[in-house]
Image (cartoon, grey):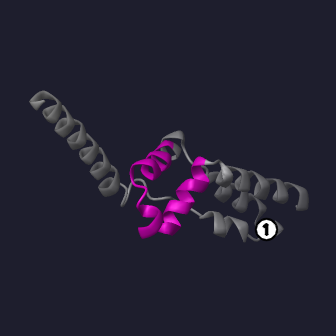
Amino acid sequence: MNLKSTQLKIAFGKFVIIASMFSMVGCSSMATPGLSTAELDTFQVDCRYKEQQIRFLQSQRMTSNQKLGAGLRNIFAPWEALTDSDNYEDREQITSQRKEWMLNQTLLQIKQQC
């Protein structure tokens, strides 16, 4: 019985350490960079600045590490859905590929209109 109790304490301790790392580190490195999905939804295409807009939108793409970090942060810090709902929702949009789809649609819109 004492062995099971020790193993349970070790497992719980590992979980607390991992959850703490994700909640503390996320303040800067795992925050969602760039435009939010709401901002992308209202992005205005201006053909006078076609090349600049294309470069800007391309720079908004997430790396695979950023996508992984967003997903892990939402898994290991589910309480942020209540305490930091805007960033939680943005990370959810990243992991579901919705943000990537919105970027592609905006780039397609520039291509078709300009």
Quadrant of the image occupied by residue 38: bottom right
Figure quadrant of the C terminus: bottom right
Q: Report the residue that reaches farthest toward the front.
A: 1
Q: Main secondary structure of the magenta part?
A: helix
Where residue 113 sits in the image (x, y, percent)? 89, 62
Where residue 92 sits in the image (x, y, percent)? 56, 54
Q: Is residue 78 magenta?
A: yes
Where residue 4 sits in the image (x, y, percent)? 17, 30
Q: Report the residue that reaches farthest toward the left.
A: 2
Q: Which residue is mark 1?
A: 45
Q: Is residue 18 magenta?
A: no
Please rate how many residues cluster around mark 1, counting C-alpha atoms within 10 Å: few if below 14, some from 14 to 19, many from 20.
some
Which residue is more in the foreground, 12 or 108?
12
Q: Is residue 93 left or right of residue 30?
A: right
The secondary structure type at the circle numbered 1 is loop
Residue in the picture at 24% in, 42% down: 12
Which residue is more in the foreground, 66 or 2?
2
Residue in the picture at 29% in, 44% down: 18
Quadrant of the image occupied by residue 9: top left
Where residue 64 sits in the image (x, y, percent)? 53, 40
Residue in the picture at 80% in, 70% down: 46
In this rendering, the answer to whether 9 lies above or below 94 is: above
Figure quadrant of the N terminus: top left
Which residue is more in the foreground, 22 or 42?
22
Which residue is more in the foreground, 35 or 99?
99
Residue in the picture at 82% in, 53% down: 108
Residue type of the residue flagged with mark 1: Val
Q: Which residues are magenta?
A: 68-95
Q: Is residue 28 left or right of residue 14?
A: right
